Amino acid sequence: MQEYVTAAVSLRKYSQGDLDGRYILFTERFGRMAGKAKSSRKITSKLAPHLEPGTLLKVRFVEAHGTQIIDALKERNADLSLRDLDHLAMVLPEGQPEPEIWRMVIEGRFSWRAALAVLGWDPEDAVCGACGVRQGAFFYIPRQDFFCAICVRKLPSITRQNAVLSLHVPLQPERHMDEQGKSQSSPRSPIEGRGTEAGS
């Protein structure tokens, strides 16, 4: 049975069974990983407060019938919104360390533009995956593609809330065809929603 210790940021938590909890962590040594904490949903659990999403902690776990979190110690809160934490849980690869993103998180300089570039989706010259217009101001996580401000509004509202990152790319006028097929200029709509550069 192997035992490991690493620094981590808790990204998500789930219920598992009647009393157990399952947690998604972004760890310094192992990247994104999931683990079960036994009895963490008991009101008397001393482990659960240290594993709340947004917590920067030291975690100890073992590989025995899956990953079991056996100890955790909170150090401080990470400077990320719950929405950013949830989106990180969606985009980070499983079991692959991401030291550059890790440093951005713990040093309080996280941004989605920089993180996506590290992960291979550089938004610098992004084009909309739906209409081909530059620039893609939004990143649609399930499709791993960029969308412009007009096309992203065609997605269901719940999808925009839960699976779209706003990158705050400056928007330029674009040209669209009217019903008669004539080209006409129309300004892009402003980016909706509040968000730090981290893209909340």
Image (spheres, helix red, strand yellow):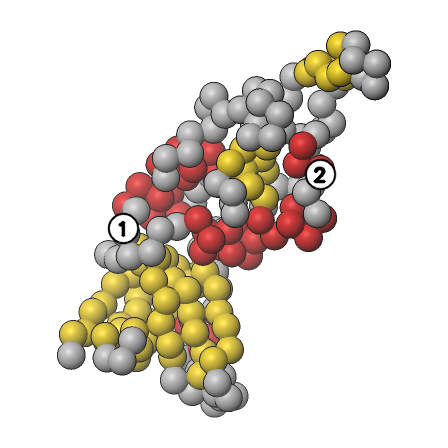
Image spot of residue 106 (x, y percent): 37, 50
Left or right position of 187 against 94:
right
Q: Name the image quarter holding the N terminus.
A: bottom left
Mark 1 Cα shell of 10 Å, populated few (<14), some (14-19), many (≥20): some
Specify the quadrant of the image occupied by residue 168: top right
Q: Residue at x 26, y 72 (%)?
A: 60
Q: Of the two numbered discs 2 and 1 on the same chain, state the one appearing first in sequence.
A: 1
Image spot of residue 71 (x, y percent): 31, 77
Q: Residue at x 84, y 14 (%)?
A: 180
Left or right position of 99 against 156:
left
Q: Secondary structure at mark 1?
A: loop
Circle nearer the viewer, 2 or 1: 2
- Report the amino acid beneath label 2: Lys
Above-or-below relation of 32 to 194: below
Q: Residue at x 83, y 19 (%)?
A: 179
Image spot of residue 143 (x, y percent): 51, 42
For the residue pair 63 and 47, the one nearer the viewer reads as 63
Specify the quadrant of the image occupied by residue 110: top left
CA gap, disc 2 to disc 1?
35 Å
Name the disc covering residue 154, or none.
Answer: 2
Image spot of residue 94 (x, y percent): 33, 56
Residue farthest to the right? Answer: 180
Q: CB of mark 2 within 8 Å of CB of mark 1?
A: no
**Residue underneath mark 1:** 97
- Report the amino acid beneath label 1: Pro
